[in-house]
Every structure is written in C-alpha cells, then in structure tokens.
Amino acid sequence: MLSPQAARALETVLETKRFWPAGSGGLDEVASGLTEDHAKAERRPPSHPLCDPSPSGGGPHEVTLKFRLYKDDELLSDVRPYGLHPYDMGVEAHAGPERAYLFARCVSPRIKGSDSRDVRIEGKLTHAWSKLPDTVPVREAHLTILHSATLAVVRKLGCEGDAGLDAAPVFRPRGG
C-alpha cells in the first residue's frame, strides 16, 4: 500500500526499520466504508481506520491513518490551525509534526451517484506522542506517507484521474 518513498518516510518519523504488523481496517474495508457512507449521505460520516504502524518493541510513536467523507464547510482552507502548514496538494493539504490532512474529490464508475455528487475524501495522519520538530522535512515526510495511503484508497475506489493526486507527492507550500 505504501510507496517505497512513503515506507522510508515512515521509517524516518518512527525512527525504526522494524514495525508491528499494522492493524485496523485495511484498504478493502476503507474503500467499502467510504462507498457505503457516500450512498447514505450522512452529515457526519464515521472515520475508517486504514492502519496503525508502530515500532516493533513498543514505544509511543504510533502513526494512525484514517479516512472519511467531508463536506466543503469542513475544509481547513485559510483557517491555519495551530501547528499545521498548508500545501497545494489534492483539494488542499495541511501538515505539521503531529498530524497531516489531505482532501481529495473522486468521481468513479464504481460509486453510484459520484458523477453528480463527487466523493469528498479526507485522509488524516496522526502521529501520537510525536517529539519531532516542526520542520519542512518532518511535514513532507508526514505528507509523503498520507499521500501514498490516499493514492492507494482513490485507486481502490477507481477514482478518475487518481482524484487529482500526482503519482508521487509534489510539495508546493500554499501561500497566504
């Protein structure tokens, strides 16, 4: 599921090359959950956990990847939440030392009604107990991991044009 570049970024942010098997729902469950949520059109759909990689041998450095549907009024846009920096990736992206968000829109022949009401997907990476500094390399590592996971989700859903995501992450800080 993760690209080689994202796997290296995960090794960097978790400071290890050995991991416990990643738990949670997996790619199939995330894709089916998002598809079902789109059909229900709920205001606050649930999050679907993709995986929770953590260092083998324990330690409080877990990274969690979750996906859910969003409404346009939930975009972070120019709010500039504390500790997050905006990037021009997907619809929008934000990253910091403890978390990252990536928003994308999907039209897919596999998802009924997405041609008239696109599937709006929020990917979220949370790095629990992160002691990493707020630097460009840390932010880009988190976005690399999240981009790779989001790309796997949109490809599993059959999103046209990979939901506007580049094949590899391109880091363009958004001014403002």
Image: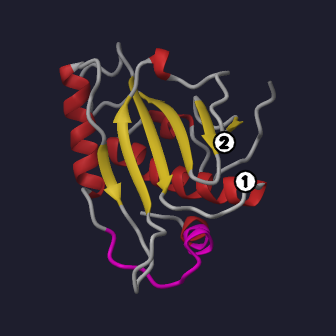
Which residue is label 2 attached to?
A: 83
Reply yes or no: does residue 102 show up in magenta. no
Quick one: SS at disc 1? loop
Highlighted range, magenta: 8-22
Tell me the amino acid under the disc marked 1.
Asp
Determine which quarter of the picture holds residue 47: top left
Reply yes or no: does residue 12 show up in magenta. yes
159 horizontally vs 41: left or right: right
**Residue depicted at x 45% and y 42%:** 123
Q: Given the current orientation, which residue lies at the most extreme right position?
A: 175
Total numbered labels: 2
Q: Where's residue 77, x and y in %?
A: 62, 22
**Residue depicted at x 53% and y 65%:** 3
Q: Where's residue 69, x and y in %?
A: 35, 30
Q: Quadrant of the C terminus?
A: top right
70 or 131: nearer the eye?
Answer: 131
Q: In this view, does 50 lie above or below 163?
A: below
* 3D distance between C-alphas at marks 2 and 1: 8 Å
Tell me the amino acid under the disc marked 2.
Gly
Quick one: SS at disc 2? loop
Q: Are marks 2 and 1 in contact (CB under 8 Å)?
A: yes
Q: Where's residue 105, x and y in %?
A: 47, 28
**Residue depicted at x 77% and y 54%:** 136
Q: Which colour scheme is used?
A: secondary structure
75 horizontally vs 69: left or right: right
Q: Is residue 44 above or below residue 156?
A: above
Which residue is label 1 attached to?
A: 134
**Residue depicted at x 35% and y 15%:** 117
Q: Where's residue 20, x and y in %?
A: 36, 79
Q: Which of marks 2 and 1 is nearer the N terminus?
A: 2
12 horizontally vs 162: left or right: right
Q: Is residue 88 above or below residue 72?
A: below
